[in-house]
Image (cartoon, grey):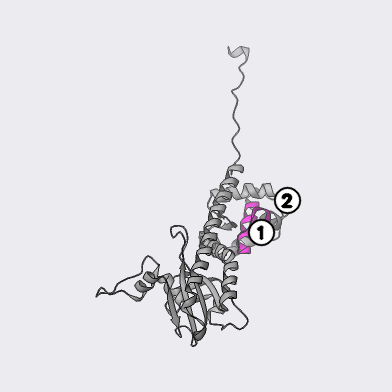
Amino acid sequence: MDQSVLSSSISSRPTEGASLGAVAKALTVLNQLISDDEPLKLTELAERTGLAKATVHRLLATLLHHNMVEAGSLGYVPASHLTGKNHHHVEFMNTLRHESTAHLTELHKLTGLTSSVGILDGTWVHYANRVYGHRAIHTPSFHTDQAPSQQTAIGRVLLAYNKDFVDRDTSGRPTVLGQIRKLGIAHSANTYMEGVSCLAVPVPVDHSTTPHVALSVSGPAGAVSAAIVPLMRRIAFRISQDLRAHHADSGQQEDEYANSHPPFPRPRERRPARRSKDDL
């Protein structure tokens, strides 16, 4: 099932008063989630579909039960098998962007350097957020939010903390990634773009539930100094704390919502039929 099939099934935005069956209403909700390409809350879905909130809530419960949608702290999204997207990855990127903005802004103000956070996406770095000034050097990643991991300090940190990294070569000597993991810092200069230097440190997160995250600063080679590493580590720790707090709050909110809104109506208890005198 793809978006074109769903779109053709529903030609116009419905209203609550329209005579739509349950299946048509469910497809309306699902089509809205696919076309928006971002998580939507219950209220947002009701507003955009024209259906009552209670109706949308019942439909979402059914769609969740049949693995057609997924629910997260940011809202509802179509199931991954419908779109081919890893929505947990998208949701985490949105969370990382939101929780890191204030910290990246502080780091940029204190250093004057481009400040970024990112995660590993295959063999590439996927930048979730970046704060920079009007004089910043625009590398190719400014246009794509991606960069080759081996050519950037942030990518090397992410590779070093990946579970598949190799810390020693065949002769038993530490590899470059092994040294980065031991020191907790990576540096690159003139490898991704001539004249650009970069420093990166890991962001301590729970790797059992979230991807590896790294923090970096970049700028002209002469402006990037190892003296700012302690500051970067403090900023990385603060981002980590906010991510953990967000994860804890989201889990609590989700539990509260689930307990206060049972997904399916409880079945009515059937009372035993009254027996007439003739049955006695």
Residue in view at x 62 percent, y 19 percent = 274
Mark number, residue 237: none
Question: What is the quadrant of residue 69 in the picture?
Answer: bottom right
16 on left or right of 143: right
Q: Residues within 10 Å of mark 2 (few under 14, many from 20)?
A: few
User: Mark 1 is on which residue type?
Assistant: Ile
Question: What is the quadrant of residue 110 in the picture?
Answer: bottom right
Residue 116, how many percent across, how many down? 54, 73
Say if 200 sits above or below 17 in the image. Answer: below
Residue 254, how many percent across, how many down? 57, 49
Residue 147 shows in this picture: no
Circles 1 and 2: CB distance less than 8 Å? no
Residue 183 shows in this picture: yes
Say if 24 sits above or below 96 in the image. Answer: above
Q: Residues within 10 Å of mark 1 (few under 14, many from 20)?
A: some
Q: Which residue is mark 2?
A: 16
Q: Which residue is mark 1?
A: 10
198 on left or right of 22: left
* Viewer-nearest residue: 76 or 6: 76
Q: Earlier in the sequence, mark 1 or mark 2?
A: 1
Residue 106, how many percent across, how many down? 59, 71
* Viewer-nearest residue: 34 or 11: 34
Q: Main secondary structure of the magenta part?
A: helix
**For residue 16: magenta?**
no
Q: Secondary structure at mark 1?
A: loop
User: Mark 2 is on which residue type?
Assistant: Glu
* Viewer-nearest residue: 53 or 177: 177
| Quadrant position of the C terminus in the picture | top right
Say if 65 sits above or below 224 in the image. Answer: above
| Range drawn in magenta | 25-44
Residue in view at x 48 percent, y 71 percent = 230
| Quadrant position of the N terminus in the picture | bottom right
